[in-house]
Image: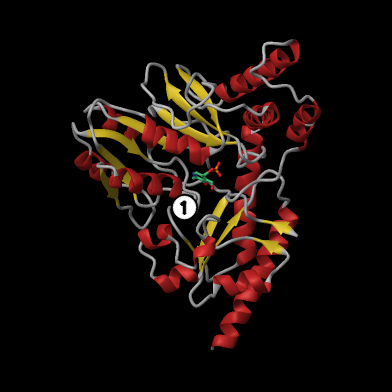
Amino acid sequence: MIYLDYQATTPLAPEVKAGMAPWLDHFANPHSPNRWGREATAAIEVARGQLASCLPSGGRIVFTSGATEAINLALKGAWVGDRRKIVTVVTEHAAVLDSCEWLERHGYEVIRLPVGRDGLVALDDVSAAVDGDTALVAVMLVNNEIGVIQPIAEIAAIAHAPGALMLCDAVQGFGRMAIPDGPDLIAACAHKIHGPKMIGALWARDGLALEPLVHGGGQEQGLRSGTLSPMLCVGFGAAAALAARRREEDAGHVTNLWEAALAALGPGWTINGSTEQRYRGNLNLCRAGLDGARLISELRDLAFSLGSACASGSGRPSHVLRAIGLSDAEARSSIRLGFGRYTSEAELVDACRRIASAAEAQGRFAA
Ligand code: PLP
């Protein structure tokens, strides 16, 4: 199996696995005052510090069950007086879009801004939408389907001018690139950076008022009740520390892979979204007449996808590809190849050549 679905999730790093292993046996409750409990708390605080080194200074980190929960906490828990307007972008992840829909049902006004063919939101559109009623502007750093990078610092400055907050879903960029200055709330998770699933975090600027969604024992500074898992927190911290240490090496490897993949695929493919403002570990491509779903079932030992793993069961064409102007047919003719730290150039080239010849064969049969 050649794994090319790095946007859906990433393989656990061996260093992370080794760091987590002792915590399978060390079962103490980190909220207990005894020595074992204090050891677990200490390990969690080391992990919090490791995450902090990938995030801006001047904020606090709340561990959550994943980025979905972190995004829900930010959107539903951050209050800016009695403001009731949210500004977001049509290509956001379902965690943002569905939370916004829920807020709409509870009296909020939600503005969903369009994107251009390049997948990027226009700053003029953000400026026109944000006003004195706006509580929060939610825009992601790297798009999970097409990899484009939104101008986060500029958007945060626009949000701040009339006193709104800025939430950045940084899941696909966290640990891989510096988080731009400006956001007041940042969501991230471990499993996109070679850490374990079911652990994420919300970074919140100091002094920002947040209401918890989950009530109970008051853990995580009263913002997320429930017993923390030392093993998952340690895994997240180790993954973040490793990503920070390897950032340049990983980025260089990804750029080489991107070029090798394009060369091996050959002509006939169009890259979806901006080719400049993007993370190069995400190659989302369209080929006229291709049946992307059929290609996946024809190449069963290659793990790639059509778009977001969350939407893949729905059978609906991707909302992101539709938003950048692709027709339903073009969206169904698009595939997403995601690669990174543990992808070798040889296996990627092999996979891309097989994808190209299977795609050509589809074209020959259709002709
Ligand atoms: N935001 C983006 C951009 C994602 O890619 C994902 C994961 O698919 C999420 C949010 C949700 O993350 P989690 O799986 O930790 O809930």
The residue identified by callout 1 is 275
Q: Which of 46 and 100 is in front in this view?
A: 100
Up the image or down, 165 lies above or below 38; here it is below
Q: Which of 278 and 18 is in front in this view?
A: 18
Q: Is residue 84 left or right of residue 68?
A: left
| Quadrant housing residue 107 | top left
Q: In this view, does 198 lie to the left or right of 278?
A: right
| Quadrant housing residue 348 | bottom right
Q: What is the image's colouring?
A: secondary structure
The reply to whether the residue tagged 1 has its Cβ within 8 angstroms of ligand 1 is no
Q: What element carries label 1?
A: loop
Q: Residues within 10 Å of mark 1 (few under 14, many from 20)?
A: some
Up the image or down, 277 lies above or below 51; here it is below
Which quarter of the rendering shows the C terminus? bottom right
Image location of residue 198, percent across then percent down: 61, 39
| Residue at the (77%, 37%) spot, across then down | 14
Q: How many marks?
A: 1
Image location of residue 7, percent across then percent down: 57, 49
Q: Is residue 361 left or right of residue 132?
A: right
Up the image or down, 337 lies above or below 163; here it is below
Residue 298 visible from this viewpoint: yes
For this orientation, the residue located farthest to the front is 216
What's the residue type where badge 1 is placed? Thr
| Residue at the (70%, 45%) spot, across then down | 11
Image location of residue 171, percent across then percent down: 52, 40
| Residue at the (72%, 63%) spot, across then down | 350
Which quarter of the rendering shows the N terminus? bottom right
Image location of residue 51, percent across then percent down: 58, 25
